Amino acid sequence: MSEAKIRRPRAETPKGFRDYFGAEVTERKAMLDKIAEVYHRYGFDPLETSAVETVESLGKFLPDVDRPNEGVFAWQDEDADWLALRYDLTAPLARVAAQYRNDLPSPYRRYAMGPVWRNEKPGPGRFRQFYQCDADTVGAPSVAADAEICMMLADALEAVGIERGDYVIKVNNRKVLNGVMEVAGVLDPTDPERFSTERGIVLRAIDKMDRLGVEGVRALLGEGRKDESGDFTKGAGLSDVQAEVVMGFMTANITIAAELANLVFERFGDDSPPSRITRAMFSFDEKTGQPLTTDEEAVVYRNAVTFKHLRAIVGASPVGLQGVEELEEIASLLAAQGYGPDRIVIDPGVVRGLGYYTGPVFEAELTFEILDEKGRKRQFGSVAGGGRYDDLVKRFTGQSVPATGVSIGVDRLLAALRAKGRSGADTAGPVVVTVMDRDRMADYMGMVADLRRAGIRAEVYLGNPKNFGNQLKYADKRASPVAVIQGGNEAEQGTVILKDLILGAKIAQNATLEEWKDRPAQVEIARADLVARVQQMLGGQ
Amino acid sequence: MSEAKIRRPRAETPKGFRDYFGAEVTERKAMLDKIAEVYHRYGFDPLETSAVETVESLGKFLPDVDRPNEGVFAWQDEDADWLALRYDLTAPLARVAAQYRNDLPSPYRRYAMGPVWRNEKPGPGRFRQFYQCDADTVGAPSVAADAEICMMLADALEAVGIERGDYVIKVNNRKVLNGVMEVAGVLDPTDPERFSTERGIVLRAIDKMDRLGVEGVRALLGEGRKDESGDFTKGAGLSDVQAEVVMGFMTANITIAAELANLVFERFGDDSPPSRITRAMFSFDEKTGQPLTTDEEAVVYRNAVTFKHLRAIVGASPVGLQGVEELEEIASLLAAQGYGPDRIVIDPGVVRGLGYYTGPVFEAELTFEILDEKGRKRQFGSVAGGGRYDDLVKRFTGQSVPATGVSIGVDRLLAALRAKGRSGADTAGPVVVTVMDRDRMADYMGMVADLRRAGIRAEVYLGNPKNFGNQLKYADKRASPVAVIQGGNEAEQGTVILKDLILGAKIAQNATLEEWKDRPAQVEIARADLVARVQQMLGGQ
């Protein structure tokens, strides 16, 4: 007992979890508020389900076929029911859509923002609780719903401060990919489960085109691939003929480039000087064949050729053809609303990992460069993705319900805004009123009250006031712009001293007083002028 | 296997949990945003800890001595660590204050808003996940910090829409109560654990003064009390002499009333007409002796007499005297900032249930009446409470850290705002553009885009458009103010039809068209005038 007495609990965040302080909270909130405003204007309603679901309705494991062993946080209720923390916001939506199917409007447009939990091995920057921000439309079979989601996503990215040109939303259709699989002989429409392992490998290979290039993808379609470190990844085991079908699709962009060249020559002749459109059409990434242009006229050409080419590849597959037609409809709806390729492009190379997508898929990428941990430039990359998943509600009701949606990676988008210096929230510290004379606390509280009434964030020092240096250190830790000081002398004379802490910080940064010489580090002013003078100092930030 | 095949998961919210839809989410958010704005202006920083804590740092059970068997949702990690969902926002704050004690500013003012979880038997209106909204100051020993919390709470209540006069914040001090216990012989300063059961019963009895009256409380101090239904509640077993000490404290307000009468007579003489102050001083609740006045001058008298009286009761207890002095200091700081008894009052009858309070305690009550489930009028009651708890961080570090804070009952305050018709959030449905001709989806999407660009919430119908009646039913379910209709004829003529759904709803309510006869139920207008005419209709709501 006496030994146990000195055993104290450790004050520690559980492994893989973290705390968010001050600006981390307000910046995220400011971003989500702006997104919610866009979603609201589009007619989407907020939904907040509880963090806890029954394991039965949630499904015990993540739906990602990539990682079947990763789980959820689950426990057994006193009634022997298994409960779990939600691992995403889509599974609870499917449950809600089934549970309230007679009460909800149909189609049901909803958005949801909140934490989700994953019982995964934590890693650097990888936490077991993180935010998701989803918007979905349930009960809308038309691809107009998919087009709407893409346009809304573009609006949301711009609303939070990602400028046009700094992002692109890529749209593809799983049905096109399925058509390719069917033609390549790894999808049997009469037995959808057959070849699912092979398809998984093929989809992952396609998804890695950017990183592995044509050679690497080709290897993964066959026996497998040895990477630079010598690690071997088993391939899909496709025959050469099968692999060529997939590679034909993968290199479609390169073929399209050649065809576009012919189109341009036909139209402008061999001798035409390289026009804007010609140049735009030929701006392809050498390694992947991805078009680099956002020139609108060029893209109309490109889309036309792309669709023609896709039809040729998946022609033997009805589902593949349907996929191409859907993409054409989406492209035409987007064009009609003026969402050009500077915002949204058709890109047959987009896969999206999750197994449950059944139709259009989308992915938003930020195209500006940042420096990675090693100081190398790289594209910021994906910040949102989604697609159509028509079978998720069926688990509950037996009836297929069409649904499509998008999820924004909250932490990644926030990191992008910070990298761009556009996180935007008000993160300024408060004016700190110091305490020189403990008995005059009411006077000091009166000062902060006056400042607050004028809308200025302000607080009185509430620690032990004996050591004045500690009070200024406190003001510094609070990132306070101004300290207010009133000792006995000042009180008698009806004055206060304002200490300019922004100035102090600037001098510390620049090591020169020159440019600040007209700005006094501290001034004694009449108490009656407190609010006006502080406002002046804050305005001069 | 074939039998298992047809077994589908039930689509159900787990027992004791619920989902929040649309306005339920936006109204709560609007309220919390307003509170956060006040807290921010007071210099409080947001903190968001994870939902999951180690059981070790959380403590396995709720700290409320009332209900020791109620627990938390907990489970064992793969590393054999026990994890749990937080049951409040104070325990995580204590953990954070200990974990980051070298990095946080001291004092540390923080606010936190978010869900907490309780593994309790659910009941009507009692859920296992609910919101809390807390503000605390850690590391401030002075009661100025308590006074600040009370003033900030008053500002927050007014910011969300509770008018002055519709609420009162009551302040007491646990040290005064402890002084009473000491004098009554149920608190031994040399052995604080002794008599803790008796003290628990006494505190609960005091807390129920409003409901039980003097007789009921007296019974609970002695052998016990049999209520109207015949149920017996065991009492604290105090002797008559002991009980009289507590009752003397309980009826202090009545004694104070008598003394105030003497003061008034001394000042104004026997023959003075009943002045404003006289009348105010005599406005006491007959049953409980609680003063009903908020007249400022009368309250200065009352406070002076209250403090004199409390000193007399707890005079033999040093901690009791210290408690009275702290209350006097709080009263004087509040008075200096103009927070009069119309907002904050000293009330020795306030207890607050939690065992961990060590100094000032506060409680915010809404004083307006509402109708309960049975249609009877009753005061709305408590919506927030808190106090000083100086020992919570000590669990981790061994060092006592002064802390004080308040928690707002989010659901109760929101219910109060709804009862007052002041929930304030924008809960209007979207304008619905119907689909008459599926092939012209791009045109309909163009209409909603135009409306949205003008800041109007709008959406196109995305369900199966075949049955037009379903589209109008949908608009109705969405609480849509206006439906937009464009069939082939209208499209040819460049017009659209606007259907006024607000009018439709009003007519349905009032069953008379008279007052609406100048307002047409639907109009055909030029497509070019769409935005202007819809704006006009919405403005006329």
Image (cartoon, coloured by chain):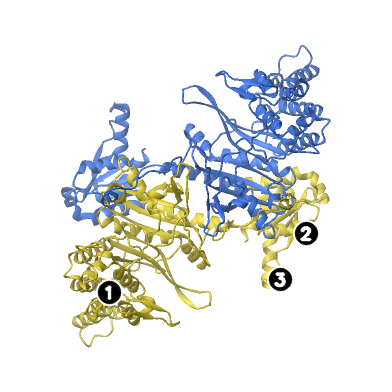
Chain colours: A yellow, B blue
Q: Mark 3 points at which residue?
A: A513
Q: Is residue A338 visible?
A: no
Say which element carries label 2: helix
Percent coordinates x, y for residue B120 in the rendering: 52, 39
Name the amino acid, label 1: Ala
Tell me where residue A356 sits by quadrant. Answer: bottom left
Mark 2 Cα shell of 10 Å, populated few (<14), some (14-19), many (≥20): few
Where is the C terminus of chain B found, in terms of image quarters? Answer: top left
Say which element carries label 1: helix
Measure the C-alpha gap from mark 3 to mark 1: 55 Å
Mark 3 Cα shell of 10 Å, populated few (<14), some (14-19), many (≥20): some
Percent coordinates x, y for residue A449 in the rendering: 67, 45
Labels 3 and 2 share a subunit: yes
Measure the C-alpha gap from mark 1 to mark 2: 66 Å
Mark 3, chain letter?
A
Q: Which mark is residue A118?
A: none
Q: Is residue A167 left or right of residue B103?
A: left
Say which element carries label 3: loop
Measure the C-alpha gap from mark 3 to mark 2: 23 Å
Q: Mark 2 points at which residue?
A: A469
Q: Which residue is drawn at 76% across and 57% down?
A: A470
Mark 2, chain letter?
A
